[in-house]
Image: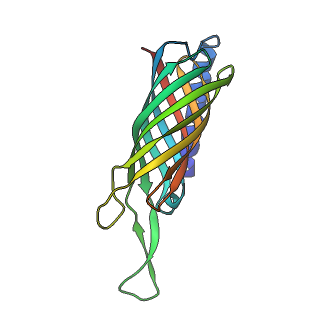
Amino acid sequence: MKNTITKVITGVSVVLALFTAKNVNAQTTPADKWRLGVGLEVGRPIGNAHDISNFELGGTARLQYGLSNKTALTLTSGYYNMFGKNIAVLDANAAGTTVKVKSKDLGIIPVKLGIKSFLAHRLYFGAEAGAGFEATSLYPDGSKDTKLILSPTIGYATKIIDLGLRYEGFFGQGNSYGLIGLRIAYGFGL
């Protein structure tokens, strides 16, 4: 799993370097303009989510409106999948022994509003808040939760590429968890 994550990060870095070299003078957040970014998300679940998953993969679309050349409003949605991992559970048939069981995947549909503020040339800080709708259930009764999402991000953007590293916290219903994620997106003006 670590080898796969390393390959993804290396690939993202190469793509970012290629796009950055071509767009040195690109303005990234034009005032009064709309942009759309389509991104790939990879992450590491933390907190309670780490008990069931070691890897998150997803895709998102982000609509962005430039308030000024340095500040933009964002609306982000998509799908995250936290892939189930093998966990040890007590064997009901043999006292004191454990067996490995694969936990279920956890799917989440995020809907977040946010702000993106450029601190320096191409370097930005973002903050998003919204709701995360569990698309799959981990509970025996089949119930699904809706979580409050809070997500700070530090990122780097050109006219075409947006690379962001974030913490994303999911809170509510007595089961809070999070993830550390990397998003690489292709963006274009509308």
Q: Residue at x 44, y 33 (%)?
A: 76
Q: Is residue 60 above or below residue 5?
A: above
Percent position of residue 189, x then y: 46, 14
Would residue 4 be seen by someone viewing this image from the given angle? no
Percent position of residue 185, x then y: 50, 28
Q: Residue furthest right?
A: 120
Nearest to the observer: residue 61 or residue 41: 61
Q: Residue at x 58, y 19 (%)?
A: 158
Q: Residue at x 54, y 12 (%)?
A: 31
The number of numbered badges drawn on the structure is 0
Nearest to the observer: residue 147 or residue 56: 147
Q: Is residue 1 above or below residue 160?
A: below
Q: Which color scheme is applied?
A: rainbow
Quadrant occupied by the C terminus? top left
Q: Is residue 129 left or right of residue 140?
A: right
Q: Residue at x 55, y 13 (%)?
A: 30
Percent position of residue 60, x then y: 43, 34
Nearest to the observer: residue 51 or residue 126: 126
Q: Is residue 70 left or right of residue 76?
A: right
